[in-house]
């Protein structure tokens, strides 16, 4: 991870977007496999004699103090509020790059994945709400609305070279819109009591970032320092701290006015990809996927929360994404990407039912971090079952619809 320094000239100066996308997919696919291993390890540990040590590790209090100012949180919340802020920072960088000069800079490439993403968020949420009407359970309505791009691309990687680049780009673009939806959901629906003083600090930090961007300051260390202040202020404000990552990313310069080959945004994106894919997301999965299945009753398994999540991820994603994309194509608002047919679109829609990382994150906001009593249900059961079945079905459909290379 190189912060504030030079990166490989080949990475910064490249104009070949195909090479950039290939590197991206390699990282995301490998990261998805590592995510799966981390999640499995957490589940195994949670169902053995090592579970007390697992819980002790995650509940360990970590404190940062400067004079009378302090941040004291258990390890689990440092991971969910701190490390995931870096993940959302990377999401913000990718989003800005895609909108300025990537696949999403061409409006023709935006419509289909955008429509699919809307359907893929609305229908899973509706299915969840159908099964959960009480005021406590309904807080989890957004859990099945998320898609885990790393896991989805990891599943695609198992199909090898038979997967056309158009499917990968469609899936990635849809996931970007999905992330935008998740960001808005967190901002508007999972924000606690607001501190106006802390928000004023966030506003002041944002103004500084704006001035740095306008003056085309390309020193990444300065942006990181101001971003850290904004993160702390956001953490204290009651708005979820991960949103600070997206906010800061929007002000990172795309190009240097002095040197057109220099891109602070691409440099930071390149530096963070491996860290996020191979450390932050696996650590998050390990910390949040530990489900103790000992003594789980049918009442818990069939509770509306896990059932609503599992059915939302499996049926909701397929119906929402494929259904709205079909309508958009038939209405001639968009067209299927080259190399994609209806069957492969359906398989891709099923694959989007892998909600894992983002679903676990939203689940933690909806229940764990609010102190809700979870004796009657565990939303992670629904996330794991829904994601696993969606991944298997999506993989099998795509395997049968895509021809093996000759």
Image (cartoon, rainbow, N blue to C red):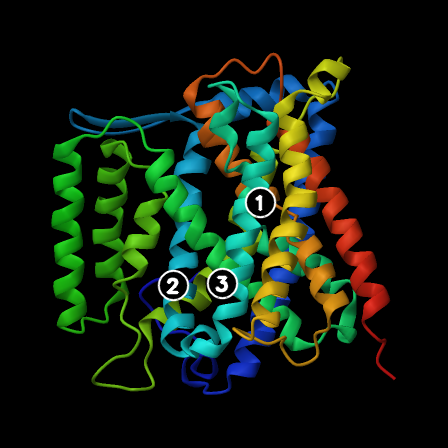
The Cα–Cα distance between marks 1 and 3, rounded to whole angstroms, is 14 Å
Badge number at residue 114: 3
Cα–Cα gap, marks 1 and 2: 28 Å
Residue 94 lies, in percent from the top left, at 43, 65
Looking at the picture, does residue 202 appear above or below residue 51? below
Name the residue beneath numbered marker 1.
123
Q: Residue at x 74, y 43 (%)?
A: 388
As helix, strand or loop, the secondary structure at mark 1 comes to helix
**Numbered disc 2: secondary structure:** helix
- Of label 1 and label 2, which has the lower sequence position? 2
| Crowd band around label 3 with a 10 angstrom C-alpha radius: few (<14), some (14–19), many (20+) | many
Give the number of the mark in front: 1 or 3. 1
* Residue 347 in sight in this render: yes
Whichever of labels 1 and 3 marks the residue nearer the N terminus, that label is 3
Residue drawn at point x = 60 percent, y = 71 percent: 329
Dot 1 and dot 3 residues touching (CB under 8 Å): no
- Mark drawn on residue 65: none
Q: Is 288 in front, or is 96?
A: 96
Q: Please give left or right for residue 166 compared with residue 40 in the image.
A: left
Q: Earlier in the sequence, mark 3 or mark 2?
A: 2
Q: Choose between 240 and 311: the one closer to the eye.
A: 311
Q: Is residue 173 left or right of residue 234?
A: right
Considering the numbered disc 3 on the image, is that residue within a helix, a strand or a loop?
Answer: helix
Q: Which mark is residue 93?
A: 2
- Judge by depth and name the residue closer to the eye, 41 or 236: 236
């Amino acid at each position: 991870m190189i912060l504030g320094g030079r990166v490989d000239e080949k990475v910064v100066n490249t104009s070949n977007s195909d090479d950039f996308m290939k590197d991206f997919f390699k990282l995301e696919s490998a990261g998805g496999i590592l995510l799966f291993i981390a999640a499995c390890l957490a589940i195994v540990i949670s169902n053995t004699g090592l579970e007390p040590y697992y819980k002790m590790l995650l509940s360990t209090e970590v404190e940062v103090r400067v004079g009378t100012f302090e941040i004291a949180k258990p390890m689990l919340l440092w991971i969910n509020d701190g490390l995931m802020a870096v993940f959302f920072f990377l999401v913000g960088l990718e989003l800005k790059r895609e909108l300025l000069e990537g696949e999403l800079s061409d409006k023709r490439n935006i419509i289909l994945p955008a429509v699919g993403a809307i359907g893929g968020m609305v229908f899973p949420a509706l299915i969840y709400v159908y099964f959960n009407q009480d005021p406590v359970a309904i807080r989890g309505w957004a859990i099945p609305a998320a898609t885990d791009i790393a896991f989805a691309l990891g599943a695609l990687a198992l199909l090898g070279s038979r997967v056309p680049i158009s499917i990968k780009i469609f899936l990635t673009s849809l996931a970007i819109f999905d992330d935008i939806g998740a960001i808005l959901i967190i901002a508007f629906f999972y924000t606690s009591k607001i501190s106006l003083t802390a928000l004023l600090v966030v506003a002041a930090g944002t103004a500084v970032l704006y001035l740095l961007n306008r003056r085309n300051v390309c020193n990444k260390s300065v942006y990181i320092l101001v971003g850290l202040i904004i993160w702390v202020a956001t953490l204290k404000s009651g708005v979820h701290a991960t949103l600070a990552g997206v906010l800061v990313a929007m002000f990172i310069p795309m190009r240097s006015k002095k040197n057109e080959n220099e891109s602070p945004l691409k440099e930071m994106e390149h530096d963070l990809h491996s860290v996020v894919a191979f450390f932050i997301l696996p650590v998050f999965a390990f910390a949040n996927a530990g489900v103790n299945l000992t003594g789980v009753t049918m009442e818990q398994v069939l509770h509306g929360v896990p059932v609503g999540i599992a059915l939302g991820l499996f049926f909701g994603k397929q119906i929402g994404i494929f259904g709205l994309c079909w309508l958009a194509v038939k209405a001639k608002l968009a067209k299927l990407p080259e190399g994609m047919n209806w069957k492969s679109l359906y398989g891709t829609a099923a694959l989007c039912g892998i909600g894992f990382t983002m679903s676990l994150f939203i689940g933690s906001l909806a229940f764990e971090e609010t102190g809700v009593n979870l004796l009657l249900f565990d939303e992670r059961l629904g996330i794991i079952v829904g994601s696993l079945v969606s991944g298997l079905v999506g993989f099998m459909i795509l395997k049968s619809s895509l021809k093996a290379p000759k």
